[in-house]
Amino acid sequence: TFDFKKISMEIGDLISADKYQPADISIASDLPSYWLESADNTLLTKALSSVKAGASIHGRLRPKEDPSYESHILMIFLVEVEDESTAQTLLELSQKKKHTDYSMIGIAQDRLFCLVVARSFVQGVKSFETPESTARFSKGIKDILSKNLKAN
């Protein structure tokens, strides 16, 4: 229903204006269940079965930001689901998930859900981002999603 290429490019521009360099944008990609799994995945399975479209944007930390910059990645997953309540379910699942080795925030706007994950992929290297610092992407992504919802 939405122009995921346009939205993904706008999110890529958002992270490019920050501490990350967009490394990969993929359209027609999935939201990996791993990030939202819990002891009971009933709601997650149902929500993911209603995904109509998906995209992912990956960014690499810029060298000037941290000596271990090569170890850090920012992953943003965007999906369109059947209805607003499903997007809210995904948001709630993202807020309930407890994690210690990466930072994650969810953003829901109408039928769109976006999951932002920042982590180090090298064992023993602490994540550059915290849940508090990752929250800085929330407003920009919400604005991008809102603008594209209105344009649709």
Image (cartoon, rainbow, N blue to C red):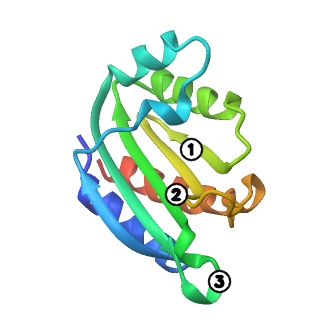
**Residue at the spot of label 3:** 65
Which mark is nearer the camera, 3 or 2?
3
Q: CA distance from mark 3 to mark 2?
A: 22 Å
Q: Are marks 2 and 1 in contact (CB under 8 Å)?
A: yes
Question: Which image quadrant is residue 24 in?
Answer: bottom left
Q: Is residue 13 above or below residue 43?
A: below
Element type at mark 2? helix
Query: Residue drawn 54% across and 51% down?
Result: 116
- Amino acid on which disc 1 is placed: Ile
**Residue at the spot of label 2:** 141
- Amino acid on which disc 3 is placed: Glu
Residue density around tag 3, few if under 14, some if 14–19, many if 20 or more, within 10 Å? few
- Amino acid on which disc 2 is placed: Ile
Where's residue 96, x and y in %? 69, 28
Q: CA distance from mark 2 to mark 1?
A: 8 Å
First of labels 3, 2 by sequence position: 3
Q: Is residue 149 above or below residue 35?
A: below
**Residue at the spot of label 1:** 107
Front-most of residues 12 and 98: 98
Residue density around tag 1, few if under 14, some if 14–19, many if 20 or more, within 10 Å? many
